[in-house]
Image (cartoon, rainbow, N blue to C red):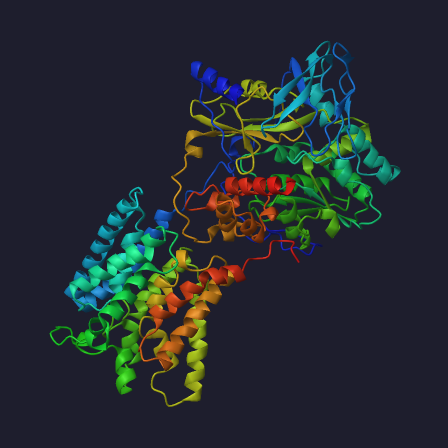
Amino acid sequence: MAENKQQIESDVEAKAPVFHVSSSPHLSSTSHDTRKMMLDVLIALLPVVIMALYMFRMYALQQLLICVGSCLIAEALFVRMRGKSFSLYDYSATITGVILALSLPGTAPWYVGVIASFVAIGIGKALFGGLGMNIFNPAMVGRAFVMISFATALGASGYIDAQSAVDAITQATPLTVFKQAGVSTPLWRLFTGVTNGSIGETSALASLIGGIYLCARRTASWEIPAGVLSVVLVLGGIINIVDLNASWTVLHHLTGGALLFGTFFIATDPVTSPLTPKGKFIFGAGIGALVMLLRVFSGYPEGVMFAVLLMNALTPLINRWTIPRPLGNP
Amino acid sequence: MALTIDGFAGSGTFAHGVHPPGNKMFSTEMAIEVIPSPSKVLLPLSQHVGAPCQSIVKPKQSVAFGEMVAKGGGFVSAALHAPITGTIQKNVVTTLPQGRRVEAIVIKADGEQLDGDALYEEILGGEWSARGLEKFDAQQISNAIHEAGIVGLGGAAFPTHVKLMSNDKMNIDTMLINGCECEPFLTCDYRMMIEAAGPIITGALLAARAVGAKNIAICIEDNKPRAIDVLQKAAVGTGIKIVVLKTKYPQGSEKQLIMAVTKRAVPLGGLPMNVGVAVSNVGTIAAVARSVQKGKPLTHRVVSITGGGIVNPKNLLVPIGTPIRELFDYCGGFKKNAARVISGGPMMGFAFTNFDAPVTKGTSGITVLTAEDVAKSKETACVRCGRCVDACPMNLVPTRIALASRNKDIDLAEQYNIMACFECGACAYTCPANIPLVQLIRTGKGLIMASKKK
């Protein structure tokens, strides 16, 4: 050490470059960092946000502004309380806010969004130790909290708003209509998103575009959507075959509700999903199975949120089950 | 360039890995140059894997070029030979780039030295025959390698005679000559393949005879078409196959190379011989040819001095023991933005500051990186994106092992097979959160070693 120090000092005197040592590797890839990955998610959310703004106009804008604003304020507040350095630059709170807003009905009162945001960031994330340490998807923690606390604002009736100018959102959501009245919404409306629902979930097309972008960029792992969609396809297909007259077909299951939005934007949150490709597929498959279970047998019309939260809880266990075998280990 | 793996079961690549920029342009077109003979050399007694060797010379004694100055200290050890003619001086202690402090024999140059073209001719030139090698039996070849003090010149410095010996218990059917040189920047093996195809072909045949292997392949990544071309021509009629592999880091790692060519997985904790394969680097194999056919010891090696921080990057033929500082001087010194000096390449090499350290048998190159190269963003939290899992050529979960090591949770680190990691750096290279994964894993290994000693 003394020798090295002398060396450095003598180099400085000679105005030669100063050399430092460090552990290998000495190069790092600059093509992606955490911040760029988060930006990717925001870019992928654009089609969904645009569709939400088109469908729900001021309601969507209001909900987005409330949730993103509250999430950023909550993040700043909790980070300061924990005595950590500023962490807004990583965009993770922005993403939580956008996803939370998109998963709420546009007509939910302003305080619902604010409370959901503070619960998402505070209980969903900060309590566990901040970004990377949380077990549950923060946005879904916030949404679950307000869904139970303000059941009417987020229940079936919360989606019906007689004052709306847009025809589609004066009706109940497609899944609720089917659950209560047994009436199916036409597939093309589910696909394009001209229906009522949480502001970001209505358009299957918008979610698909964003989701494919995320998977192509490897920001989201394709194994998770593959797991969810294949199980929904298989289970929905079986139900379809058992009851051939059912008007809510497997395609309605795939395009309706929050399935695609949840699959591509919520389930793929890397922090709360398993690490290995195999684990990711199991995680996705579990979500698919739980969604179908909740949709078909429970009192709720939709089950994506609870399915994701339940599988989040199982993630540490899945990680433990799927420790990959090293090369050369029989 | 199309992959060529005819006659072997492998696919020409391995699972996972990364694609760092090759950065070979600094020195790839620089023909091997002989440096002026140094005024003194330092020969560390421990510059290989295994027991240190024992000095057999005394201060003030005169030694001639090629004379043995230290004998092997055991079976897994390698002798040292004088790379210059001169007088022995008092032993000194020097710090090698790896951080080890070792005793070294010092030889002060004295009298007539072989240098310039004559030295190039002596080490790499001459006539090499691919025929008539039947006169050497396996034992003779192994003995010649042992006496010449040859160790793996790719960087690992494992004594070569231990690898290349006939073994009654293990049936070795394949001899792989490693010319991948997957480390960014380094070009010494590439220059050897272009300029010294003769000894590589002869050495490959001799090595295969030593281990009794029927299949011989020289393995090169597809980003080196010129080397492939030269060796394909040189190998005509010898039965040696030139295997062209996909360019990917770490293709030159022994286990990944064996997988890519033969589709055999070396068991954890095992050796290539466990799956019937022997692997040796192109530079090593040229030294083998020289030791067997000409009876000459290992005294010189080719070193790449490269990177954006050096004024004139070059490939140099240098006497082992030359102080590294002299190589920098010969290459015009450092540029102003030079920021880190690494023994080896940037992925697995060691950063060091003691430029009086000598070139050892395992010094494949010195990479001088610039401030821009080593600029690192701040470390952020792991978001468990799994990119390190996708990069790990050993199929491990680097983030888990590293964070377990950081929390001193040895059990968890072992559960995730920390000891299977060979520190290639693919995970830390790719990590979007800039977590020093390899450094943490090394710390974890150290903790495990310490706990086992108790």
Q: Position of residue B213 (x, y in %)?
A: 79, 47
Left/right placement of residue B186 relative to residue A60 reads: right
Which quarter of the figure has residue B179? top right
Left/right placement of residue B175 relative to residue A42 reads: right
- For this orientation, the residue located farthest to the front is B454
Left/right placement of residue A32 relative to residue A71 reads: right
Q: Position of residue A24 (x, y in %)?
A: 52, 37
Which quarter of the figure has residue A67? bottom left
Q: Position of residue A48 (x, y in %)?
A: 27, 63
Relative depth, front residue between A146 and A195:
A146
Can residue B277 be seen here? The reply is no
Relative depth, front residue between B9 and B98:
B98
Please, is residue B413 above or below residue B87 in the view? below
Which residue: 58% across, 27% down?
B97
Q: Position of residue B301 (x, y in %)?
A: 67, 27
Relative depth, front residue between A146 and A197:
A146
- For this orientation, the residue located farthest to the right is B135
How many labels were placed on the picture?
A: 0
Can residue B318 be seen here? The reply is yes
Instruction: Look at the image and tell me in which quarter the C terminus of chain A lies.
Output: bottom right
